[in-house]
Amino acid sequence: MLACPDRSIFCGTNSSLVPSGGPVPWETYDGAFVLRSVKLVADGALGSEGAAMHEPYAGREEEGWRGLLLIDEARLGPLVSNWVEHGWQVVRPS
């Protein structure tokens, strides 16, 4: 897996290789390096009530808990645009 030093900016070639512990998904049978997409994680998980929501979570209305936003909304659009402009496919976790 390639990782940017700061996850909320476009790092392009300024990235580092992070061991994934599994097979290398970007290597073809002839040894060519192929990497076409970047995965952005902008919020937490739904099960732990960390996913960013428009309305507070049920049962937590009083405290107004709406989850975690890991990348500021104002920076997310330009971040995605920058990756796309540089030829990357941006994917979201499902």
Image (tube, grey):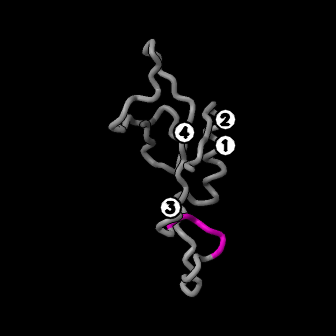
User: Closer to the camera: disc 4 or disc 2?
Assistant: 4
Whole-percent x, y for residue 90 in the image: 61, 41
Q: Decide: few, some or many residues near mark 4? Use Cα within 10 Å; few <14, some 14-19, many ≥20.
A: some
User: Closer to the camera: disc 4 or disc 3?
Assistant: 3
User: Closer to the camera: disc 3 or disc 2?
Assistant: 3
Q: Kindly identify which residue carries mark 1.
A: 81
Is residue 19 rendered magenta in the image? no
Which amino acid type corresponds to the residue marked 1 in the rendered image?
Ser
- Of the two numbered discs 1 and 3 on the same chain, state the one appearing first in sequence: 3
Judge whether 47 appears above or below 11 on screen.
Answer: below
Distance in Å between CA atoms under marks 4 and 2: 13 Å
Judge whether 38 appears above or below 6 on screen.
Answer: above
**From which residue to which does the magenta span run?**
50-55
| Point 59% across, 83% down: residue | 61
Q: Secondary structure at mark 3?
A: loop
Is label 1 in contact with label 2 (beta carbons under 8 Å)? yes
Q: Kindly identify which residue carries mark 2.
A: 85
Is label 3 in contact with label 2 (beta carbons under 8 Å)? no
Which amino acid type corresponds to the residue marked 3 in the rendered image?
Ala
Which amino acid type corresponds to the residue marked 2 in the rendered image?
Glu
Q: Kindly identify which residue carries mark 3.
A: 45
Distance in Å between CA atoms under marks 1 and 2: 6 Å
Is label 1 in contact with label 4 (beta carbons under 8 Å)? no
Q: Kindly identify which residue carries mark 4.
A: 38
